[in-house]
Amino acid sequence: MLSLIAKGYGVKEVSELLSISTNTVSLHIKNLYSKLNIHNRAEAPCS
């Protein structure tokens, strides 16, 4: 999921690609940002 976010995919696009709800994607993004101590998509590492 992090690689999709880093590539510029939006929440809706990620949810459709992974077949999960947009709320689930948002929650995962929030948790990833917290664990990686980042605050926005620009700071997300590309992998």
Image (cartoon, rainbow, N blue to C red):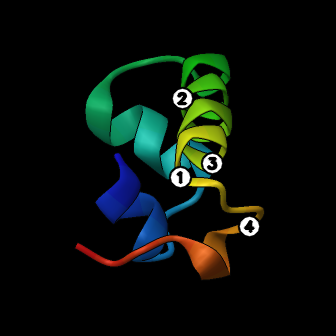
Which mark is on residue 28? Answer: 2
Marks 2, 1: nearer the viewer:
1
Q: CA distance from mark 3 to mark 1?
A: 5 Å
| Residue 24 image offset from top left, x and y in percent | 56, 18
| Point 40% across, 36% down: residue | 16
Q: Confirm or deny contact between disc 3 and disc 4 (CB under 8 A).
A: yes
Mark with earlier residue (4, 2): 2
Q: CA distance from mark 4 to mark 2?
A: 13 Å
Q: Amino acid at mark 2?
A: His
Q: CA distance from mark 2 to mark 3?
A: 9 Å
Which mark is on residue 33? Answer: 3
Marks 3, 1: nearer the viewer:
1
**Callout 3 environment at 10 Å: few (<14), some (14 to 19), or many (20+)?**
some
In the displayed orientation, state which residue is furthest to the left.
47
| Residue 29 image offset from top left, x and y in percent | 59, 40
Is 34 in front, or is 40?
34
Q: Amino acid at mark 4?
A: Asn
Mark with earlier residue (2, 3): 2
Q: Amino acid at mark 1?
A: Leu
